[in-house]
Amino acid sequence: MKKKFSISRRIVAAVMASFIAMTTLSACSDDSDAPDQQTDKHYVIGVIPFNDTAAEQLDWNNYLTEYVAKNYNIEFKFATAPGDAESAVTVVEELKLAGAEAILGIVDYPAAIQKANELEMWYIRAGGLSTLSDYEQIKDLPYYLGTMGPSLDEEYQAGYDMIESYVKDGKKDILVFAAILGLYLPSDMHVFRFEGMRDALVAAGAVYTPPASGSVVEGPGVGEFASGTSGLNITTIYGYPIESIDSTFHDRFTQAVSGKTFDAVAMTAEGSQNVNTWLNGAGITGVVIGEVSSFNATAGEAFETGILGYVVGKYGSSMGPAVIALINALDGHADIMRNADGTGARLTAPFWAANSSADFAAKRAFDDNADPAFNKAIMDKYIVRLNPSVTRTSFIEFAGFSFDDLKALH
Amino acid sequence: MKGAYMKRLAKNILLTLIVPVSVTAIMLTACQIKGVPFWAPGSGFRAFIYSMMLAVFSAFALSLHMFAGRFDFSLGSVAILSAVIGGKIALAAGTNMFGMLIIFLIVGAVLGTISGLLYLLLNLPPMITSLGVALAYEGLSFAFSEGRGIQIALHPELLGGAALTPMFLILAISLIIMYALMNFTRFGFNYRAIQYGQKIAVDTGLNEKSNALVCYAICGSLVAIVGFLRLSYNGALQPQLNLSTSGTIFSAMLPLFIAALMVKVCESNIALVIGCFTATIITQGLSSIGLSAQTRSLISAFLMMFLLMYSINGQKWRDYFVNRKAKAAVQVAVA
Amino acid sequence: MIVQESGVITGISIAENIALGEINQFGKYGFLRKKQVVDKAREVLATIGVTDIDPSLPAASIDLQDRKIIEIAKVWAKSPELFIVDETTTAVSQRGRSILYDLMKQQSAAGKSVIFISHDIDEVMEVCDRLTVLRDGNIVKSLPRSEFSLDIIKQLMIGRELQGDYYRSDYDGSYPDEVVLSVKDLHGFGLTGVTFDLHKGEILGIGGMSHCGMHPLGKMLFGILQPQNGSVKATDGSQIKDVATAMKRALGYVSKDRDSEALIPLAPIRDNIVSAGIDLIAKGGLFVFPTTEKAFSKKQVDDFQIKCSSDLQFINQLSGGNKQKVVFGKWIGAQSKVMILDCPTRGIDIGVKQAMYQLMYKLKQEGVAIIMISEELAELIGMSDRLLIMKNGKISKEFARSADLSESQIIDYMV
Amino acid sequence: MRDVLLKYGNKLKPAIPFAGLILLAVVYLFVTDFHPTPFHLTTIINQVAVMAVLSTGAVFIFALGSFDISLGVAMGVSVCVGILAYNAGAGVVGMLFVCLAVGIGVSLVNSVLSSVFRLPVFIMTMAMLTVLTAVLQILIGGKSSLLVPSGIQAPIKAFDNLWVRLLFVGVYFAICLVLFNYTKIGRRNKLVGGSPIVAAQTGVSIAKQTIITFLISGTGVGLAAFLMLTRAQAVSVDTGASTGMDVMMAIVFGGMPLSGGAHSKIAAGIVGSLSIVLVSQILTMLGVSPGLSQVYKAVLFLAVVFVASLSYREKMLSRAIMF
């Protein structure tokens, strides 16, 4: 008995120690966020990730902590990615408790945005545009700045451009991987990207047959392509490669690709390394893959080894304008972003795209955390406090800067 | 004597094969009627074996714990964490796929042992310990990789592990090892003694703790194989949070229930493999004839429920059909 | 050490049972030689004079009494310096008993020691060289063989001279005519047609060999087991089909498996006592208040002089006798008018035993009908108004209460 | 010394989870620089409500020595049907009744399966988890989520506040407290948890007890669904997916032994839920990353449960009791 108590005491001590360590650590991190500009107001901004482990999200987090926090007097509090609407509301409350005054959300649960409004925290939905139906529910909330990111048209265009580039390069045998479309995990982004691919293929002469209603495929569904006048051989596949979620994905994948060869793969999501591995496993090699992902190191390696041939996606500093919108709002200039009629704005931001290793490497180098695409020099010009001449129109332009725009400004 | 033995053996083999063969026949016929291939020519078979292998090793680990009266939520998280750690070591060491497999086995065993030590130290119900371990391991697999998981797709020398030949080799070797372990080692002997009579075995002076610890280590290695196969097949693995790794366990339940049907007439390890085979055939067949994921999971859940009912009420149901006299005899036996 | 409960694991083979805990002797480097294990087991069995049991068979394939022999072999295989036998003989067949006595002699002849724990004074007096009497966890006294005497030992065991009679003293086997339980032609669970009536204020003894069907009979009377044929009817003519109806008709049942069927070991005394009488103290048929509950359980604890720190003490910390008192308290608290007692004095010391007998007699006088199922003929003879002897699922003989009734008269109808 | 320890250990043991909670509260205060505001309290109650109701109901199942791992998804289905009903014009009160009906209905199915077919609850509910997940997906019908109109004027917003939550949790907990501590239902629950055989031989109908138990927890599922709905105003395929495990953690955190029986405490659900909410808020306030925060939660969970279990341990290793 005595011995057991001593063990327990030790464990309790360890827990206490870890708590103390945690508290001290956080205290230290407060210090390390020493303002570069003493005149800057100190703001705390909460971040709600859409997924804790997605490469894209990790790049954004990296930009926020490694660049923005160091160059502005801003502290970021990261929440755990919420799994459903209720936890999104919880996360908003927790961020408020953690001292956040505004929220940079990569999710758009209306209830969470309402909660932020109720708690008088500015909310911007970044990284992609909210769907219209979600937007309609919340656009009138006074603390809702709006949504910023590639629009669904951009998503559509991304898919369209990827296929168009393949066709232009003379790729004949194309695998279209529509990711989660056929599952009960629908996402508008994926629908629009696929529709872009579909229309590009149809424009090239292929004939599309949508899935029959009541067929195998749930959700929006993925149909089949006949080559028509295009001279293309097109195969479609959908699914989600986590075995415990989509237990027959690998079966469907092999069913779809067996006995075929491919020049190119067009994906509505990221994961070129996985697709390449599966294709190799099925005995198919030397395929060029195009994905919608982000300009990060993993994609870079894949480009160098020739797995990736086309990338369209976001990049770490694409969060920059959203942060500036929040700073403006916190400074009392929410109207720079919000519409004149008092509703939240919908501001479009373009993707970047690369179709060669060199192209990719150049763009990636351009968005380095030492000097990112959206750097302090550019962004300061759109902080009303520092530059009172900013207007709503110029801010909209700023949010929509393309690669070339940014390049010209550097 | 020998004749009787042969006869019994033949009967047992027949009884063992009845379920998998009939299920396969039904599924093949269904595909035939639908006019679809059961699996894709070429690599479809590999995808099938891969699915089966995942089931086999999850079920091996789960059953090893379950028959000793433990339930382990953390198996899925051990698979992922051993992939993250093992993968990183393998990349750093510049080894090949065999080296990677061995690294995985060791890492899995270490992770399993840690989990087992925690169980022994705390002496809480294993289900509770395993919840804590699952949370911690999921968190660590995130923390160790800064959330990025592990990618080996660009290292072809590490990738071959999920090809047909290595998979069959792994299966065969594991089966032999598991069979030997259970039947020809002190561990297996003590394990069975504890399984059937924990109190007596402990009173007789058997060291339950060391047995449990070895069991944890073995289970760790077994699910590390799951991690190895998933990483080899997919080229990359993402960490999962919020106990979502426990899905691995739920998917190993159906094979276990099927295996339970034939465990009386068949060596338990083989029964388990056959159970996994049958379950995978069912999933694959239902998918090939075009049922949606929802319908499939409904069917397999109902099947599991039915098997559960059968295993508990089967005797009663059978009695219902035989005459009352036989029923009386059974009741005497029960009393 | 050979323990009172079954010490054989049924899922593994006989040989493996014998090798349990000693497995390191067989094979090297963690591997196991199965043949060695079986050979060694055969050898061990032979040394204790058993050659008709094949050690390679699964332990589940042999009957309970042979399993006890396996257990003896298991312990003997370790060539112990000290051989502890705990209450084993009550569960063992005549053959097992002689093997055991034999081994005990061999052990002592070899200059090694034996500790033999038993309730059976006759047995102890027969085989032991020295006797230590324990009471309430304390050593009372040690006696050399020369000082063995039945009376002295009994006295030491209860700590005082037995006050009054051990069993009841009267030989008046009368009881009122009112039938409280009417049993007709019961079949199933080994019974092949059992019929009898139980009367108010009667102590009805039921005896026989342990597999004669009397234990399932007890369960059937209480509605735990359902007969295939036949009926059990209470005073008002209603049939007893399940435990709930049995309890409504004021039946109570004391199981022979105290720790697994009668009491919840990991619960306080109070919860256990209240469990059967909960309907009596529930207000509006639903609400139970701690104060009434406490009073209810306190009464039983006091009445039975249950030794405990409080009635919140857990059952698993009590001695066998005190546990049995809790069981009795549970049913008497529930105001049972018919008590079915299955081996009510199994595994409890002589003092508590006597208290139980006195209690039964008191209950009889209060008009409670008692069915006492027992494997001990002495107590059946000592207590019953009427004694039914069972054999092969049938009542083979009925005896009325008499001073002349002896065990030898009865035993012919049992075997 | 050992006896004293045992004696007081037994008396103090129920207080350990409370002590844990108080310790957490102190850390919480420390983290908030000893300036707790009404908002802190409001948030804690807002966040704890759903879990508290669910886990209080689940205590009854736990006391039987069992666990229903499908509770969370059952709530998800209940939320979903509630939204469908509301959107079909059922009104907020109608929606509440629909939620209750679905929660109780699902629980009834569970209880019948477990009592009539004698299926072990834990494994049975694992299969139910799959069934209910599929049902939820089919009900949602391929959309990313189903919403109820939730503008500021929406009727449902009137229920999205602290007082409604306090009322629901308070009333439900009070009823459960009475049922568990002051009625035959609670006594018999503990009896069955202690030993089903003894309970059966003492006249307790295990089947009836199981059905009553599931009715109580089913009511909890329905109420929790309503609270969830007023707060989240949406349902997606992930709603409730991890809740089953969270409830299990909460109850164990609250000092409930996994084996049920006499040690069962009705407050375990609320104490555990509060502890988990506090831990989660503390970790977010400290800005711990998602991975590490899970590790801390795990350590704390095991530590609290270990200390709470100290006084009733046996020589043998613990085993699962559900098989």
Image (tube, helix red, strand yellow):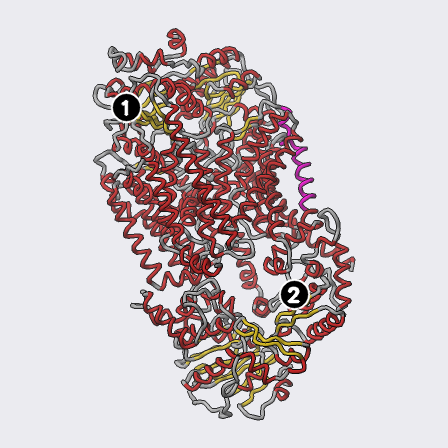
Q: What residue is at 34 percent from the left and 39 percent from the top?
A: D28
* Quarter of the figure that contains the C terminus of chain C: bottom right
Give the camera-side residue of C281 and D84: C281
Q: What residue is at 37 percent from the left and 25 percent from the top?
A: A31
* Residue B151 place in picture, x, y as percent: 55, 26
Give the camera-side residue of A287 and C321: C321
* Residue C212 place in picture, x, y as percent: 60, 77
Q: Nearer the viewer, mark 1 or mark 2?
A: 2
Mark 1 vs 2: CB contact within 8 A: no
* Residue D240 located within the stretch drawn in magenta: no
Disc 1: which residue: A145
Name the quadrant containing residue D44: top left
D165 relative to A214 in the view: left or right: left
Q: As displayed, is residue D207 above or below residue A323?
A: below
* Residue B189 place in picture, x, y as percent: 67, 53
The magenta stretch is B156-178
Disc 2: which residue: C1
Whole-angstrom CA distance, mark 1 to mark 2, is 79 Å
Q: Chain of mark 1?
A: A
* Residue B161 located within the stretch drawn in magenta: yes
What predominant SS class does the magenta segment belong to? Answer: helix
Q: Is residue C247 visible?
A: yes
- Identity of the amino acid at label 1? Leu
Q: As displayed, is residue D309 above or below residue A300?
A: below
